Image (tube, rainbow, N blue to C red):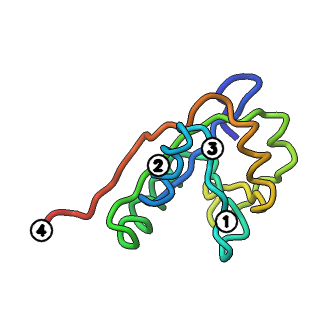
Amino acid sequence: MEQGSPSSRTLWRPTGPEELALVAASGWRAWPPRLPDQPIFYPVLNEDYAIRIARDWNVPASGIGHVTRFEVEADFLDRYPVRQAGGRTILELWVPAEELEEFNRHIVGRIELVHSFHPPQP
């Protein structure tokens, strides 16, 4: 897991426009509650994986894909084992939806928008 500082870890989250609007409405400090069909919140552990999801999944699904970066207290993250969701660099955390409010309280600073992807122009 990459480190932001000794006491925090850097995570990324690929997201579509609706979720990003809710993050912005929180003052860039919290992730919105999951929808009923979304029992898990999936932050990812590297920027490349987040870019691939935003570009290859969010753009076709929503017309735009974003990548955000944020820091979370390292000690708090220790409760979530790293999950390998494919290849050796496809790493994520699985945060149960009912724990997302507590997870948000351990975000350090603000959630940052670092990339946006649009469909290719013909």
Answer left or right for 60 relative to 96: left
The kind of secondary structure element at disc 4 is loop
The kind of secondary structure element at disc 1 is loop
- In what quadrant of the picture does the N terminus appear? top right
Q: Determine contact: label 4, label 1, CB under 8 Å.
A: no
What's the distance in space between the residues labelled 2 and 4, CA to CA?
24 Å
Quadrant in the rendering for residue 39: bottom right
Q: Could you tell me the amino acid type at mark 4?
A: Pro
The kind of secondary structure element at disc 2 is strand
Quadrant in the rendering for residue 93: bottom right
Q: Could you tell me the amino acid type at mark 3?
A: Ala
Answer left or right for 8 relative to 26: right
Q: Which of marks 4 and 3 is in front?
A: 3
What's the distance in space between the residues labelled 2 and 1, CA to CA?
18 Å
Point out the residue furthest to the left here: 122
Where is residue 107 shown, x and y percent of the image?
Answer: 69, 36
Q: Choose the circle earlier in sequence order: 2 or 4.
A: 2
Determine which residue is flagged by label 1.
85
Where is residue 90 shown, x and y percent of the image?
Answer: 61, 58
The kind of secondary structure element at disc 3 is loop
**Is 72 above or below relative to 92?**
above
Determine which residue is flagged by label 4.
122
Determine which residue is flagged by label 3.
30
